[in-house]
Amino acid sequence: TFVSVLFGTLTSIVAEIILDADLDPTITRTLNASAAADAEALMGPWKETTGFAWFDVIGFHTHSGNINLALPLCTSLLLALNARWSPTTKYTTLKEAYTYVEGEIFKCRTRTGEYSGSASGAATLASEAQEAEEKEAGAGGGGGKKKKKKSSANKRAGNPRQVFAKKMEGMWNDLASSEVRQESLKKPSSYDLISLNRQYECADHPSLYEEGKVLVSNNKELIRETIKRYQWRIDDDGLRALSAGDYIDIRVSPFKKTYETKAPLLRRNLTCLTVIIFMLTSVCTGLGAFYQAQWIPVTMGLSAAFGALMAYTQVEVRLLRVNAASVSVSRLMTWWWGLSV
């Protein structure tokens, strides 16, 4: 879109240059080779004055009409293909399904919630089954079926594998009702059901020990050495049951590090894009003040391009969500570390 605006502005500027050389812009598009060369020779004084001796004014003006016609058509085609295939929506749907499956695997391995086999887990599963039954059957009489459903849910609560299979069935049903059903899911070359034999570097917070006082110093190297001193490695085969401590080390801590890394990058991207848009708006005002109105569409088009980039990448929304997730995980880790104090 920006290139279309740029070529349109350049075409307008070239047409004004041709008019200043006492040539008709509508005729110069249909000149033969010799006539075009003669017309280009008339542009000699302008080239010597501006230093654009390398620029083929007549040639550019001849082909600019086709370019200005092709660029909007290409833009419309790309927008239509994006609306038809919805790659971003499908990617988001698959990413959510992936995250859901991964979360259910860890819940199953830690035997929490519906996977615990306790009365509370059975009640939770029965409640979910009842809600699903109400959605399918509607509000009209199904008391006997609901009772049977609740009874079977209580039985399934003692078998984590059956609970997990039920969760996966619901996930596949959700995928089948989304736009992904219009595509074919291809098995990746690096396909793996679960992450097997992974190693995790874990560490307790230094404040739990006497060396915690180094955290108030400005010596970053000393802080890293102190933290590294209390690190240990966990070998996870991806199958064994996990304790609460293992879950914190394997599942929660990596997310905390990810959020702490992402937040500064997103903040820097947001700042850069905001400053660029502000500067382009100021330049646009300056161009109007110095009577360079022909370049205002280019500046506005570039500003709109950066604005569209910011809206498409959702930098501000992602930064807010990453910060919220980081605060939530940090509160959880603070509570967990506080249990050992």
Image: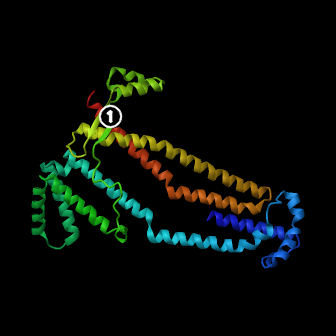
Tell me the residue at 64%/58% (across/down): 302
Looking at the image, residue 164 sits to the left or right of residue 263; the answer is left
- The residue labelled by disc 1 is 202
Counting labels gives 1
Q: Nearer the viewer, residue 72 or 186?
A: 186
Looking at the image, residue 83 sits to the left or right of residue 162; the answer is right
Tell me the residue at 69%/52% (across/down): 282
Against 38, residue 149 (above or below) is above
Tell me the residue at 50%/56% (across/down): 313
Classify residue 290 by image quadrant.
bottom right
Secondary structure type for disc 1: strand
Is residue 24 visible from the viewing direction of this image?
A: no
Q: Position of residue 132 (x, y in %)?
A: 21, 65
Q: How is the image coloured?
A: rainbow
Is residue 50 visible from the viewing direction of this image?
A: yes
* Amino acid tagged 1: Cys
Q: Position of residue 219 (x, y in %)?
A: 48, 24
Classify residue 127 by image quadrant.
bottom left
Q: Position of residue 137 (x, y in %)?
A: 19, 72
Question: Which residue in the rendered view is the most extreme toward the top?
Answer: 210
Tell me the residue at 9%/68% (across/down): 144
Against 82, residue 201 (above or below) is above
Classify residue 258 by image quadrant.
top left
Q: Quadrant of the N terminus?
A: bottom right
Q: Position of residue 299 (x, y in %)?
A: 68, 58
